[in-house]
Amino acid sequence: MSRTPSFVTFPAADADWSAFVTDYASERLEGARAHLDTIAAGRSEDVMAAWAKADIAVTHAHQMMESLSEVHPDREVRQLATELQQRSQRFRTARDGDPELYAAVATALADAPLDGDDARARDLILADFRLAGAHLDGESRSRLAQVDDELSAAATEFSENIREDVGRVRVSPESLAGLPDDYVSAHPVGADGLVEITTDYPDMGPFLDMSSDAAAREKLMRADYQRAYPANDGVLRRLLQLRDEKARLLGFDGWPDYATARMMIEDGAAIEGFLASIEGAVRAAGEADAAMLLERKRRDDPAAESLLISDSRYYIETLKTETYGVDAHEVRRYLDYSRVRDGILALSAELFGVTFSPAPGAAAWHADVDVYDVIDGGDTIGRIALDMHPREGKYGHMACFPLVTGIGGSHLPEAALVCNFPRGRMTFDDLETYLHEFGHLLHVVFSGTVRHPRLAGLSEQGEWDFVEAPSQLLEEWAWTHEVLARFAVDDDGAPIPAELVEALRASRDLGAGLMTCRQLVYAQLSYRLHRDVPEDLASASAAIERELDVRTPLDGTHQYASFGHLTTYSSCYYTYQWSLSIAKDLFTGFDAGHLLDPVRAQNYRQAVLAPGGSRPAAQLIEDFLGRPFSTRAYEEWLASLATSR
């Protein structure tokens, strides 16, 4: 039966956005309060339904405020949305830690004859109460509430400091030698005879990949690694201490054990064991990559004694060209943003049996945003917004932001991709990233029929170490001519040559060992800072980098101060490696020689994406593959990198 779509109506650009965000959040939180009061007072005939309505309202308030705090062009609106996001978080925290509400819900639901999704949601809701301290004595709950307030404020401050600090360097025009003409023309020479390059993604990525000026690359990367420092040094120290205190108040040995309580992985020790297994598998390949890149660097600089962190991207791209004939400039000729956008929409439509229909009348927060309705068999099943180019004050990286979690029968899912791609030519890395983030978007939309927000596909309280697997899986579609020839075309309409795609495929693993070692730096930084709660963050972070990176670090920098994932992923950045191992496993369920097979794609949609969190992630994987998942394939692939050249 067709459902009439009902989406959020955003104000016009010149309307009162402050009133909109205030009313949006307040109405939902007040509605949630009313539903929860009926439960606590024992007046609700259906506690599960009342809880779901309250949870939906809180979730939607939080999601919309989080998104607008990162994307709205008006700083005052962003700040107001941030305050309302904190309010919604305090509401949720107080709700989950309320002992009277816990008792009422537990009494009503503990022995209720529930099954299926209802039973799973019930069990997770009761566990959430305990993880929020609803079972603690009054004094402990009071301190926990204070800690949660301080945590929310610290996390917001940490993120704002990063978002508002864009690094800028001025370099000579000669430093742009090797960069494409459109990049050079977008960076005119100033009155001082120099060119400004920023740490925004469209500026920094191509420069690090293509500029042959080693000193300029290092200067730019140092600027990036110093963002939000020293402002965030004290903020992060406070954040770590508060998290540790919260975990111990709740009976855990430290934050990593608390943070993994809802994850696929068991506990903090399991994080350590998993990362150690990945390091053991990839270390030799990483060292071999570093030696190979240093050897190439010495052809340019015979006196070079080390490979700096700022060197590796440039020499990886250089060797791809020299060894495999992959010319980054040539690849960019075929990757115009608009054609890539339309191509990915068409690809996803064909694979998953849906249509993306432009919604030109739908207002958004900025004129740059493209809005599409997602239609399946005549039914509108969701809406997506593509906010894809940089602007002042906007979130500086790439992410999928759920705006409205879909709930079967009552709310259609809405989500936004918030990225920072150039408006014209894109790099191949940009294309991969686009597919990655689009994988998150599909997960939000296709899981929009679950009946409990607690079981949503991208629930903040779900198995977050699985959430990157669908996005990493979709990256695989960037690597075949069968796919790329559809939208990777030059200005004359000629598709990217098959031999260039084959060269890209041949070069795919070049530097993969080195870059995986870098990912281990981030993963261990995330884990160990929370495990150890060091007083001297700079020394602890530098020690991790020296231990795990196979390149020479940029001494004196403080990248941890701008490592934004420390707020969202906390101690669990291991999830990128964990999810990648799952993505490698999931990919075995497809025909690598024919990735346009819609039957397998739609089987995957139904088995893995559509259920959201209604079943454990391990079960979703097994449902699709017909066997339990394993990280072995990923570890074997990493180990093979050392001898694959």
Image (cartoon, rainbow, N blue to C red):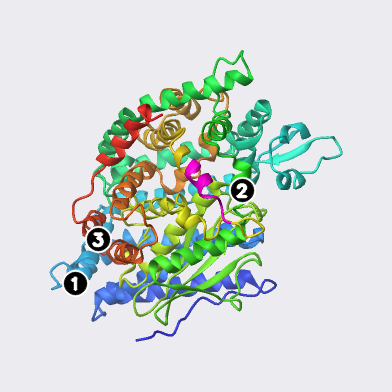
The region drawn magenta spans 495-504
Please indicate, yes or no, whether residue 201 appears anywhere in the rendered image. no
Which corner quadrant of the image does residue 512 belong to? top left
User: Mark 3, residues whose alpha carbon is within 10 Å: few (<14), some, or many (≥20)?
Assistant: some
**Majority SS type along the magenta span:** helix
Residue 10, percent from left and from top: 58, 74
User: Mark 2, residues whose alpha carbon is within 10 Å: few (<14), some, or many (≥20)?
Assistant: many
Residue 533, percent from left and from top: 39, 33
Image check: 206 left or right of 547? right
Q: In percent of the image, x 63 and y 50: which residue is there?
A: 333
On whether residue 109 falls in the magenta region, the answer is no
Quarter of the image with the C terminus is top left
Residue found at the very far right of the displayed protein:
191
| Residue type marked 2 | Arg
Q: Which mark is residue 108?
A: 1
Q: Does residue 245 lie above or below 437 as drawn?
A: above
Of badges 2 and 1, the one in the foreground is 2
| Residue type marked 3 | Leu
Residue 22, percent from left and from top: 56, 70
Residue that numbered label 3 is attached to:
124
Q: Which mark is residue 332?
A: 2
The front one of 608 and 642 is 642
Q: In percent of the image, x 16 and y 67: which residue is there?
A: 110
Residue 326, percent from left and from top: 55, 39
Q: Does residue 468 lie above or below 175 as drawn?
A: below
Q: In percent of the image, x 31 and y 70: which residue is there?
A: 452
| Residue type marked 1 | Ala
Quarter of the image with the N terminus is bottom left
